[in-house]
Image (cartoon, rainbow, N blue to C red):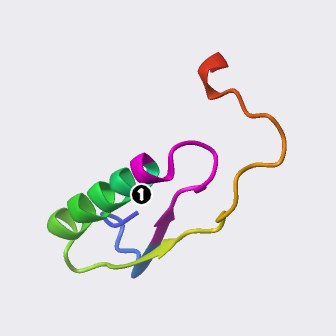
Amino acid sequence: MAKAGVDKIGIGALIGLDNWRVDSFFVAAHLDYLERTYWRTRYSISLPRLRPCEVECNLNQY
């Protein structure tokens, strides 16, 4: 999207599906890469899920 000239890109993670520290780290690492590579684009970070998932989520099955 940044290569195509999109002015602003939003990224994020569904915090609460797995370890929030790992998710947050990789969102920050992705943002760092994007800012260094496509420095003319603006970015926003979304953190839509702040509570654990209410139903059982077994991510290892995927």
Q: Position of residue 13 (x, y in %)?
A: 53, 57
Q: Which quarter of the image is occupied by the C terminus? A: top right
Residue 51 appears in which quarter of the rendering? bottom right
Q: Residue at x 44, y 73 (%)?
A: 9
The magenta-colored residue range is 10-22
Q: Position of residue 41 (x, y in %)?
A: 30, 78
Residue 6 appears in which quarter of the rendering? bottom left
Dot 1 lies on which element?
helix
Q: Amino acid at mark 1?
A: Ser
Does the segment drawn in magenta span residue 54?
no
Crowd around label 1: few <14 · some 14–19 · many ≥20 (10 Å)? some
Q: Which quarter of the image is occupied by the N terminus? A: bottom left
- The residue that label 1 is drawn on is 24
- Given residues 58 and 39, the one toward you in this image is 58
In the rendered picture of this protein, how many numbered marks are placed on residues? Answer: 1
* Residue most extreme to the top: 61
Does the segment drawn in magenta span residue 21?
yes
Residue 27 appears in which quarter of the rendering? bottom left
Left or right: where 8 falls relative to 30? right
- Given residues 43 and 18, the one toward you in this image is 18
Q: Is residue 43 above or below residue 31?
A: below
Q: Position of residue 20 (x, y in %)?
A: 50, 52
* Residue most extreme to the left: 36
Q: Residue at x 60, y 21 (%)?
A: 60
Q: Position of residue 29 (x, y in %)?
A: 27, 56
- Given residues 20 and 43, the one toward you in this image is 20
